[in-house]
Image: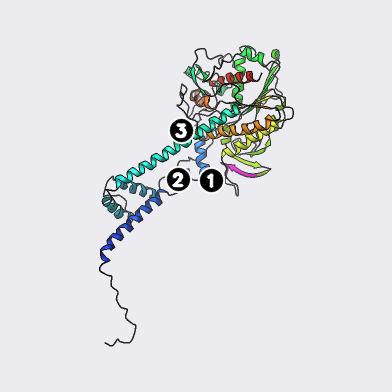
Amino acid sequence: MKVPAGKPQARRKTVPKIILPFVPIVLFFTVISIVRYSHRDISGDTNSPSSFILSSDDSYVASDVVTKHAEEEHAGELSDGRLYDRSGESQSPPPPSETTAMTVEIEKNGRGEDEGTTNNTNGPYKGATQSSTRRRSKKRPRRRQRRRRETTLVAAKRTETKAEEDDDVRVLAAEVAGGGGCDLSAGEWVGDREGPYYTNVTCDWAIQEHQNCMKFGRPDTGYLKWRWKPDGCELPVFDPDRFLKMVRGKSLAFVGDSVARNHMQSLLCLLSSVARPVDVSTTEDENFKRWEYGEYDFNITIFWSPYLVRTQRTDPNDVTRPFNLFLDEFDQSWTTQIGGFDYAVISAGHWFSRPTFFYLNGSLVGCQYCPPTPNVTHLPSTFSYRHAFRTAFRAITGTEGFRGVAFLRTFAPSHFENGRWDRGGDCVRTGPFGRGEKVLDGYNLEYYRIQLEELRSAQRVGRGKGMRLRLFDTTLPMLLRPDGHPGKFGRPASLNASNVPSDCVHWCLPGPIDSWNDFLYELIRREV
């Protein structure tokens, strides 16, 4: 046969008949693979709230962490201990995207719910999901069991890791405590019919308004009827007469924020049944006060240093604006004077959740919750917290001739519940948590661990110089006292508007913070 000139005709190829029966099977498994891959890919979408929480993306961590911290931290504390209401948009998680909604629908069908139907109309997912649901129903129970086993293993691993972390912290706390007596921080709160040992009337000269819970109508008094009982020994109730005799001719300094001042005021009130001091302050600034007990030649001083290191306001007229923290530079307001004291109680914590810029060696190295700033890395509060305590201890161990005792008073957690501190969070409990009812976790655990680690390092340096740096552990006992905060009873009822934050950081006077002076008495007694 002669082929006409022009374009050559291609010879038609045919598919061998033996392959045809396998085509539907190949197509079926191909569709299943696509569905499973898409399911896995969408489930791990970084736009989902859960993925963002686990993400290391600094921009999201900044907004989410400030929300998380604000629930329990006193992110807006003024120098006099009051709260300011920092305005800002809600940091609620983004709504589910269309892909997220589609994932939920696929998971729903994958579990056998509404089998054979789906509301998803996005292309191939509908048909593929229906088909796979019908054809793989026999395999689903086995897959469910495997998923349950995997979930159980992950949960067990997390529990084991948490237990290991708790053990590590306990060992660390025992190491820095030094074994000079029983562990005062391990125990429980027990009833005390004798308390309180002063009132807002007998000590009205020392109690600040926002901690005067009785004055502003707190109706319950049960929070005043507890004392801390260590597991391994008896902790005597504070005896003001014995305390003043023990510290005759000595001096005591408190260094820190308004919670440190809260502690000092508790001590002044407890001592007031025996002696009332004279204010010998050289300034009108309430943040730098000095009280003298002439008969006992004993004095108490408070140094305001919420960050323990040198700080600078970015706006001198607005305390809500970011602070500059020079994390390796001493705060001269207290470091130049600390060498003259026999006892010093160092503490800090709640201010570290505020917007701040971090400096090391004079250079900006990062910031926290700061406005968008070119070439500035977001760093967590634990970064500044560790550096601040490291610098504070370096100031103490570097003080020539310091022969006093420096106590690190550990972080006392706040107790905001039912919302963020600036979104209706409150603290309305009327009694303490029981043993094991509350665990130390999150940033509270991280702050506590950092304090212990930095104290341990400082002890190693100070030991060679004959210096005494001791642990004053209040973290675990105070974790169990959600009932001791002023809440809305730190101001007149007329000011309790819905947009005014509750104070779940400071402590009522009288209140659970008085037990800190039981600790202080015992710790000083061990040094005499």
Which structural element holds mark 1? helix
Which structural element holds mark 2? helix
Q: Position of residue 19 (x, y in %)?
A: 28, 66
Q: Nearer the viewer, residue 56 or 317?
A: 56
Q: Is residue 153 above or below residue 13?
A: above
Tell me if residue 279 is in the magenta stretch.
no
Sequence-wise, the earlier of marks 2 and 1 is 2
- Left or right position of 329 against 157: right
Residue 379 visible: yes
Query: Label 1: which residue?
Result: 58
Query: Label 3: which residue?
Result: 419
Q: Which amino acid type is marked by label 1?
A: Asp
Q: Which residues are magenta?
A: 364-376
Q: Which amino acid type is marked by label 2?
A: Ser
Tell me if residue 372 is in the magenta stretch.
yes
Q: Is residue 207 above or below residue 3?
A: above
Splitting the image into 4 quarters, where does residue 284 fall? top right
Residue 73 visible: no
**Neighbour tally class for label 3: few under 14, some 14-19, many 20 plus, Cα within 10 Å:** few
- Give the quarter of the figure containing the N terminus: bottom left
Report, in whole angstroms, how far the alpha carbon at label 3 lies from the one at label 1: 24 Å
Q: Residue at x 60, y 13 (%)?
A: 239
**Neighbour tally class for label 1: few under 14, some 14-19, many 20 plus, Cα within 10 Å:** some
Q: Main secondary structure of the magenta part?
A: loop
Marks 2/3 in contact by CB < 8 Å: the verdict is no
